[in-house]
Image (spheres, rainbow, N blue to C red):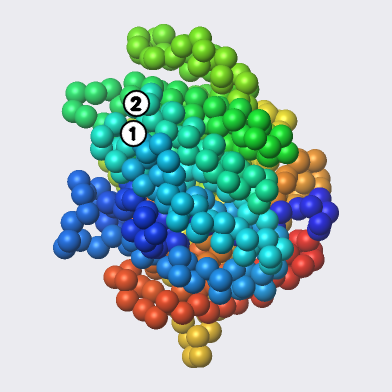
Amino acid sequence: MTNKTFLWGGALAAHQFEGGWDAGGKGPSVVDVMTAGAHGVARQITQNIEADKFYPNHTAIDFYHHYKDDIKMFAELGLKCLRTSIAWTRIFPKGDELEPNEEGLRFYDAVFDELIAHGIEPVITLSHFEIPLHLAREYGGFRNRKVVDFFERFAITCFERYKHKVKYWMTFNEINNQMDTSNPIFFWTNSGVQVKAGENPQEVLYQVAHYELLASAKAVIAGKKINPDFQIGCMVSHVPIYPFSCNPDDMMASEIAMHQRFFFADVHVRGYYPSYALKEFEREGYQLDITEEDLACLKKGTVDYIGFSYYMSTVVKADVKNENRDNIVNGALPNAVENPYIKSSDWGWPIDPEGLRYTLNRLYDRYQLPLFIVENGFGAIDEVEGDHQIHDQPRIDYLAAHIKAMLTAIHYDGVDVMGYTAWGIIDVVSFTTGEMKKRYGVIYVDRDNAGNGTMKRYKKDSFNWYKSVIDTNGENL
Ligand code: BG6
């Protein structure tokens, strides 16, 4: 890990910070019909954009009109890379067009040029919860095989256009969120899918997963032809699931639950379905459309690295059955319990830096591929004092502890880590709640939950702290 090569950076996603939701010919995405919620209050998915509702992602923090100044601040911070995404609907506003929207392509040319001019490497996710709404409404999102072709066209268009500007790519952000079929926003944002009455969500999930994994493999194959130097990764959310105790029942409950975490990466990395999944398909009698040609494609289109997010860990206890799954952060796990050894954030997300070292070891042992921590951060309320001072020591503490755990995994355990990008390097709209007050940034944005504020940017205490971490390659924590 040298200061020259390690990708210290910040992470963002188009829909959470760009704004300009209908500017430059952009079409609506699945997130553009999501209202704001709060901790414990779900975001609503409306049929269309309704005039009397507030959609926080429409304006977000308006990077669309502030990108030059924001990138200047990122450069001052010393970022070596910026991980962000391309809004699919800027390039293909409805998703099924044959020709791309030139104005949308030009916007990303301008952003990437600006980043490169400031010595910041763009790291790009093709689909970060930004599927065109038209594909969701008219085609049923990724439950329809045609959407695989639309995604491939979008990917090829981006690869061709930006092949000299972008080297690091990821296909689908946190593709495994949808494993939690109990929370509709995951299926919707991952795949543009809504489960219908009478359907078995698990069977729908595996069909959708197959088409999306196929779309990813096709993108990898096409990308490598366009530029063999591309590094194309997957992106999974990794929340390790600990056993509550050394009771063998708890241990086994954790082991089986971890299949949910590994399923997508197993296919992305190995190019075939893991045996536990094949057995489940067989046991449950799922009728899935998976062809021989598809399987050959999965085999060929494996990824170069594993991008993942790490925020927290969770725990399962074999003899627990949660009745109200809305109350637990990991709703997909009916036997989840609280970890008595660690604290949680104000949004109930357990804080566990050691879990990052554990995750790095576990992923590296399993896959032996370079790992890229493309999201990690602390969502918290920030108080603005005096002349726009923000003393965000809890965020510094969180990031420092996680970076320390990462450095131990690299230097002591020998894990190959390509980089670390802190999530929401500038305050953005929260994904799960749609709030502004759940802030992650080292740069504060004056905007509140209702959309009021000057949009001015201010450095928090964590700004200079993170700058020094990058400058010293992680020595000054
Ligand atoms: C990840 C997503 O789930 O976590 C991001 O990739 C998201 O889009 C981040 O913002 C933090 O979640 P939240 O809900 O606190 O914004």
Q: In the image, what residue type sits under mark 2?
A: Asn
Mark 2 to mark 1: distance in Å?
Answer: 6 Å
Numbered disc 2: secondary structure: loop
Residue at 79 percent of width and 52 percent of height: 5
Residue at 42 percent of width and 33 percent of height: 150
Query: x, y (%) of residue 299?
Result: 61, 19
Query: x, y (%) of residue 333?
Result: 40, 35
Residue at 52 percent of width and 68 percent of height: 67
Residue 373 visible, this orientation: no
* Towards the viewer: 4 or 390: 4
* Towards the viewer: 234 or 338: 234
Q: In the image, what residue type sits under mark 1?
A: Gly
Q: Residue furthest bottom?
A: 386
Q: Which residue position is annotated with label 2?
A: 144
Residue 141 shows which numbered tag? 1
Density class for disc 2 (Cα within 10 Å; few <14, some 14-19, many ≥20) is some
Residue at 44 percent of width and 61 percent of height: 18
Query: x, y (%) of residue 58?
Result: 33, 61
Please give left or right for residue 314 compared with residue 48 in the image. right
Residue 134 visible, this orientation: yes
